[in-house]
Image (cartoon, rainbow, N blue to C red):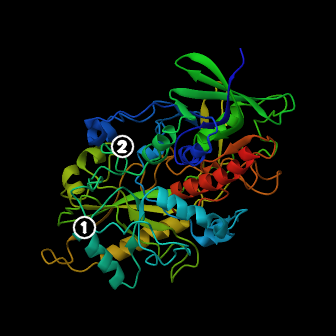
Amino acid sequence: MAAERFDVIVIGTGAGGGTLAQALAPTGKRILLLERGDWLRREKDNWDSRAVNLNGRYATREVWKDRKGKDLHPHTNYWVGGNTKFYGAALFRLRREDFGELRHHGGTSPAWPISYEELEPYYTQAERLYHVHGERGEDPTDPPASAPYPHRAVSHEPRLQQLSEDFAAQGLRPFHTPLGIQLDESDPRSSRCIRCNTCDGYPCLVNAKADAQVIAVEPALRHPNVQILTRAFVERLETSASGREVTKVIVRRDGAREEYAADVVVTSAGAINSAALLLRSASDRHPRGLANGSDVVGRHYMGHVNSVLMAVSLCPNPTIFQKSLSLNDFYFRSKEWDFPMGHISFVGKLDGVALSAGAPSIAPGFTLEAMATHSLDFWLTSEDLPDRENRVTVDGEGRIVLDYRPNNEEGHKRLIAKLKQLLNQQRDCPVHGRECHKGLFARNLYLKERIPLAGVAHQNGTIRFGHDPQTSALDVNCKAHEVDNLYVVDASFFPSSGAVNPALTIMANALRVAEHLKARLAA
């Protein structure tokens, strides 16, 4: 029986696949979305810290392996909307300089095959689509933009406002984090977003977070030419005898094998799973994996050097919505050090239950709950560099193996030290004076400051794009060099990682590729 045929098949419904589907839906072309997860149920547990953080209610139970063959339990989620269902909705553009070659203490970050200017119009479209709130010009590293943010910046609560003023008093330029939420502070009664404390790491019960399901997939499905299959795991892609065209998409769904075909096949399963899919799709024509004549598929895995640090004070931090403040003054360098260090912002407000899941170091005299009540919870990101030996492979049983050794860590260490210095220079507390600040504590004592290998939220780089088929798997339109109808629109295409969240760049690039595909489909 012949495989059911479509004009376009999109594998994955997150920041890349969902956005692409939304952009292509008005073309009238038959589009099939394949999502290995299901629709995430709206329920009270969406906002329950114990269910989300301690019990991992929505996390995958899939087991990967690390380079030593030990079990690895990835912190990732398979649902319609992908990991955007759980992201903190911080939507940054890469810096203009990130698109060029950039010298780091640990090596060189390579240039992209496209410029910032080429992606800029699509950044603007993505900000509009995903309801980004911000203020142009506050961030000293902000690249030039052709339009203001579509929504005013999210205001700081008093403790964050105080910290912003303290940073400014030290000669820094703190700014409002660009956030993709459906918030109207001028009319709180009718605002969909209620500024709760369960935005970062939780699904939004009221659908106010600008995630790919709400913003892209559901609007796409209102078009009669678009349909979705959930619980549809794509096992492999098969090609024609020449190897130049994907002819079958092999799906395992509810225990049964199904086959589909399309003129254009797009994978957007995440940098790790998209690489694994191409590697599983090896054939006589593609012995090292589909589209992998260059032997770069799965290589150059990056995920950032990330830390969560808690600044604990004697005075409580009553902030509810904490993700409004960022600092990029040390993104490229500091007065003391002429190399990039990275980005400082916040995670959603931690609570005692969330802390108990990670065995954090304890400030003297504090319980877990008290520590959470009295902390400012920082997120620090530094750039890791593409290394061929940091890679995704699949073992003989088809399981994902993630082999990664951190690099370029000196800038991150200095960024942590810089944050400690800044916090020690806060204004005196009117109640406790200089004694109020008790120090900066790691989110997890055992793991020290670093987010562990299983923390793959910022995964990128495994199917890089470029001009040279010998050193890249994709061309500048994110089409495979060796396969005429295969595209990749998740963060796999990144040649370098920058030091800000990758989501907006994925969305913008999906819109860019959508424009190319519209022309192709119309031809």
Residue drawn at 56 percent across, 63 percent down: 123
Image spot of residue 368 (x, y percent): 23, 50
On the rendered structure, is 111 left or right of 208? right
257 shown above or below 324: above
Q: Amino acid at mark 2?
A: Pro
In the image: residue 262, left or right of residue 336: right
Question: Which residue lies at the image location 39% right of the left edge and 73% below the top edge?
Answer: 175
Disc nearer the start of the sequence (2/1)? 1
Callout 1 crowding tier (Cα within 10 Å): few <14, some 14–19, many ≥20: some
Distance of label 2 from label 1 (alpha carbons): 22 Å
Q: Residues within 10 Å of mark 2 (few under 14, many from 20)?
A: many
Q: Nearer the viewer, residue 484 or 435?
A: 484
Q: Quadrant of the N terminus?
A: top right
x, y (%) of residue 81? Answer: 47, 41
Closer-to-camera residue (395/449): 395
Query: Residue at left 51%, top 72%?
Result: 147
Q: Is residue 76 visible?
A: no
Q: Nearer the viewer, residue 406 or 173?
A: 173
- Disc 1 residue type? Glu
Q: Which residue is mark 2?
A: 203
Q: Quadrant of residue 31?
A: top right
Q: Against 169, is 400 above or below?
A: above
Residue 118 can be seen in this image: yes
**Residue 218 at x, y percent in the picture:** 46, 41
- Looking at the image, the residue that sits furthest to the right is 242
Question: Which residue position holds label 1?
Answer: 157
What percent of the width, then of the height, locates residue 116?
64, 68
